[in-house]
Image: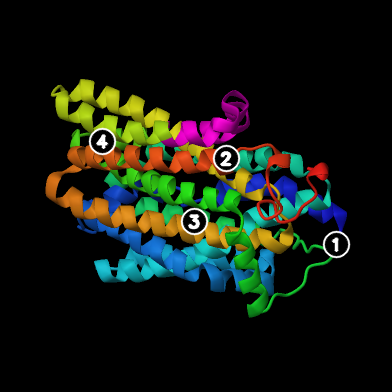
Amino acid sequence: MNIKNIIRNEKIYPIYRMFGYDYLFYSVISFLFYTITKGITVGQVMYLSAFSAIFIAILQVPTNYIVEKIGFKKSMILGNLFWIIHCIILIIAPSFELFALAEAICSFGTCLKGLSETQILYSSLKYTKNRKNFGKIEGKGVSYYYYFEAISALFVGALFEINNYLPMICTLTFLIISFVTSMFFENVKEEDTKKSNVKDYLKGFKLILKSKRVISIFIYAFVISGFVVVAKTLQKSTIVELQVSPIEYSLIFAVITLCVGLGSSIQYKFEKITGKKTLTVIGTSYIILICLLGIINIIITNRYLALIFSIVILIVHNILQGIYRISIKKYMNNFTTHHIRGKILSVFYIFEAIGKSLLLFLSGLIIDKVGTNITSVIIGIIGIIVILIILKYLKKHLGLKPEQYNENDIFGMDIKNK
């Protein structure tokens, strides 16, 4: 491997993340696109997200195998190609059933990207002995995306009013840019990398399930990731129900999106303040705010006052979301080698996807019957009870000093080198 090309990976990674971390333009306007342009209900929007999560859970293991076979770079390229196909189907599809099919294609791309992108960065940093900067580089790339998304959100509402499909055309354009950018990476292989067979995979997964530290992360993600994805729809539905125009809607979410980027960029500072309680603070605060969002919009009858309070809650919500995205990846990568890292990501995404799908289906059933605000309160109360139970388990198995873990928790690594 050419060291200059490996260093180039580190330099272009934040730029690649800026274009390819998620769907630019679409992420902000998707709720309006589905409910206004395509005419589906809020509950159906949640069902689509739930289908996506289920597909991701199903595809994790085979996708992990594919990534190991074809390498990180080709997986990134293929993942971006599937996202492009997904976007094209959304533009031309006339029915909910075809949207569900599109989600399956998108999920395959998401799995490929999720299992290759952070790994190519981590492996590159390991090769250049620069692993300590993983959080900063990943945080920089993610924050770039959200800053760019915030800028695009300033005028995406105007584009939507001109033509409902213009934001989707913009989304497709940037997905193509991400696809092209992925071709410039240098594929990274560890010196002792071996191709795994089915038995190796089963052994790897059994090893993962022996680690109470990693299982704790999975359980936490199972709960919190579900609430994060449900909160996104509740946030958008809340703002729409406060009778804002598409332009006002996009301006509000421009500010909110900027806050996710801010959260991503200050993650390491937040962690210094909260220390071992980082995940505890994020989880409890996030879920309490979901409940508070519903309560405020039930008791405050003045639309403008309710809108102000809602925006403040959404700002804090999205700062926490940005911090969570980086923190959870950092916790997973700790005490891992390339032999086990991909498999950990696979099992993590399975737990995350199942948690998302269950909560999305539940929320979808509730929201079409009782409305957004009561749904927020119900989901928030459920979340508070669940997170208190989960945190009791986490306290015993996560955030300990390296020497307090057993060999199964850190996969037999020498903690003296950590």
Residue beneath disc 2: 327
Q: CA distance from mark 3 to mark 2?
A: 30 Å
**Do residues under tags 3 and 1 come within 8 Å of each other at their CB atoms?**
no
* Start-end of magenta stretch: 255-283
Neighbour tally class for label 3: few under 14, some 14-19, many 20 plus, Cα within 10 Å: some
Q: Give the structural element (helix, strand or loop) at label 2.
A: helix
Answer with mark 1 or mark 2, whichever residue precedes in sequence.
1
Residue under label 4, please give it.
Answer: 239
| Circle 4 residues within 10 Å: few <14, some 14–19, many ≥20 | some
- The mark nearer the N terminus, 3 or 4, is 3
Q: Residue at x 19, y 50 (%)?
A: 366
Question: x and y percent of residue 284 in the render?
Answer: 41, 33
- Mark on residue 256? none
Is 16 placed above or below 103 here?
A: above
Indicate left or right for 147 with 338 as reference: left
Q: Residues within 10 Å of mark 2 (few under 14, many from 20)?
A: many
Q: Residue furthest bottom?
A: 198
State which mark lies toward you, 3 or 2.
2
On the picture, is 335 further left or further right than 80?
Answer: right
Give the image location of residue 136, x and y in percent.
67, 37
Which amino acid lies under the numbered mark 2 shown in the image of this protein?
Ser
Q: Is residue 56 magenta?
A: no
CA gap, disc 4 and disc 1? 51 Å
**Left or right side of 369 for 293:** right
Q: Residue type at mark 3: give it.
A: Thr
In whole angstroms, how far apart are the C-alphas of marks 3 and 4? 28 Å
Residue 24 drawn above or below residue 312: below
Q: Are marks 3 and 4 in contact (CB under 8 Å)?
A: no
- In the image, 216 versus 194, the foreground residue is 216
